[in-house]
């Protein structure tokens, strides 16, 4: 694998993920048909937010060429896809539905590809080696403390975690989405350089941007027993967006700056 080939691959997958994110957000049939079972509007918008986060992170990495910073992101996506495969494999076998098995195969192959990419990029030197500020390290810990219990509860199918009702299998997949996101903030704590946090901040900013307005509008129709969950979710989204904007654009210690181009493959 060469750096240039990986960059082009990230750009292609990033564009495709962005198009699919738009399709889910707009509830377009061709996009909704890629989910293994029918879902409601808010679930489709949630899937859109995940795809938007993946697209933003991949395009950020592909355009900048700072591949070492994508290590945590590759672990994030590998865990998410592996978790989805762990749900889809038994469902496909139990229900004898070849379509679900095909989804499981696709998720498994893609997860293995992400693991291979992680093993390759983690050996690369970082371009932006500024140390991770202490306040941002604290925020990474807070992210983890929110994501782990929320994800575990969803995997255990605890109701009321998301501000709309979920199918049991959807709850488990969403749980893996939350648990996998831990890598985007745990990895920068293990290798505390600014380059390792950028991908996570960009991805979460895209995720927040997709969800804030639809979730705010959902306040008018949310079930009373799910209102607290929705309010807490909105607070978390707003805080996350603010942190991402601050550290990506405003903070002198972390904001994006022009750096020497990465070396050749």
Image (cartoon, rainbow, N blue to C red):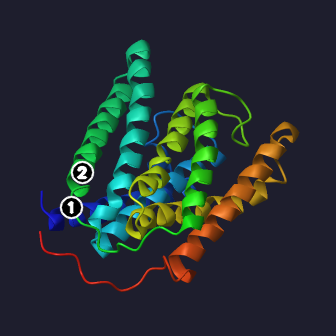
Residue 104 relative to residue 216: left or right: left
Question: Which residue position is annotated with label 1?
Answer: 6
Q: Secondary structure at mark 1?
A: helix
Question: Which residue position is annotated with label 2?
Answer: 117
In the rendered image of this protein, does residue 110 appear above or below residue 131? above
Quarter the C terminus occupies: bottom left
Residue 4 in sight: yes
Whether pointer 1 and pointer 2 mark residues with C-beta atoms closer than 8 Å, the reply is: yes
Q: Residue at x 22, y 66 (%)?
A: 8
Mark number for residue 56? none
Q: Residue at x 39, y 63 (%)?
A: 196
In the rendered image of this protein, does residue 124 appear above or below residue 105? below
Q: In the image, residue 207 lies at what x, y percent?
A: 56, 59
Q: Nearer the viewer, residue 180 or 22?
A: 180
Give me the C-alpha separation between circle 1 and circle 2: 8 Å
Q: Quadrant of residue 170?
A: top right
Residue 207 in sight: no
Structural crowding at the residue carrying mark 2, measured as other residues with C-alpha within 10 Å and reported as few (<14), some (14–19) or many (≥20): some
Q: In the displayed image of the protein, which residue is found farthest to the bottom?
A: 258
In the rendered image of this protein, does residue 148 appear above or below residue 53? above
Q: Residue at x 59, y 32 (%)?
A: 152
Q: Nearer the viewer, residue 216 or 24?
A: 216
Q: Quadrant of residue 101?
A: top left
Residue 200 relative to residue 157: left or right: left
Q: In the image, residue 154 lies at what x, y percent?
A: 61, 32
Structural crowding at the residue carrying mark 1, measured as other residues with C-alpha within 10 Å and reported as few (<14), some (14–19) or many (≥20): some
Q: In the image, residue 35 lies at what x, y percent?
A: 47, 40
Q: Nearer the viewer, residue 189 or 38?
A: 189
Q: Residue at x 69, y 41 (%)?
A: 162
Count of residue discs: 2
**Closer to the N terminus: mark 1 or mark 2?**
1
């Amino acid at each position: 694998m060469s750096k240039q080939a990986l960059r082009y691959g990230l750009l292609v997958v990033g564009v495709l993920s962005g198009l699919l994110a738009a399709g889910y957000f707009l509830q377009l049939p061709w996009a909704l048909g890629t989910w293994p079972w029918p879902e409601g509007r808010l679930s489709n918008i949630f899937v859109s937010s995940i795809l938007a986060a993946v697209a933003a992170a991949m395009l950020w990495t592909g355009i900048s060429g700072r591949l070492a910073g994508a290590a945590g992101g590759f672990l994030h996506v590998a865990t998410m896809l592996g978790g989805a495969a762990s749900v889809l494999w038994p469902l496909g076998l139990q229900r004898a539905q070849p379509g679900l098995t095909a989804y499981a195969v696709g998720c498994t192959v893609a997860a293995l590809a992400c693991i291979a990419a992680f093993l390759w990029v983690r050996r690369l030197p970082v371009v932006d080696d500024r140390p991770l500020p202490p306040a941002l390290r604290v925020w990474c810990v807070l992210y983890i403390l929110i994501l782990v219990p929320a994800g575990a509860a969803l995997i255990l199918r605890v109701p009321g975690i998301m501000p709309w009702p979920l199918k049991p299998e959807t709850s488990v997949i969403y749980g893996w989405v939350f648990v996998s996101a831990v890598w985007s903030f745990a990895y920068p704590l293990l290798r505390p350089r600014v380059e390792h946090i950028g991908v996570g901040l960009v991805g979460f900013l895209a995720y927040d941007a997709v969800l804030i307005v639809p979730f705010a509008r959902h306040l008018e129709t949310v079930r009373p027993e799910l209102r607290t969950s929705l309010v807490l979710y909105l607070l978390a989204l707003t805080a996350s967006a603010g942190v991402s904007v601050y550290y990506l654009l405003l903070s002198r210690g972390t904001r994006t700056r022009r750096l020497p181009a990465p070396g050749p493959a």
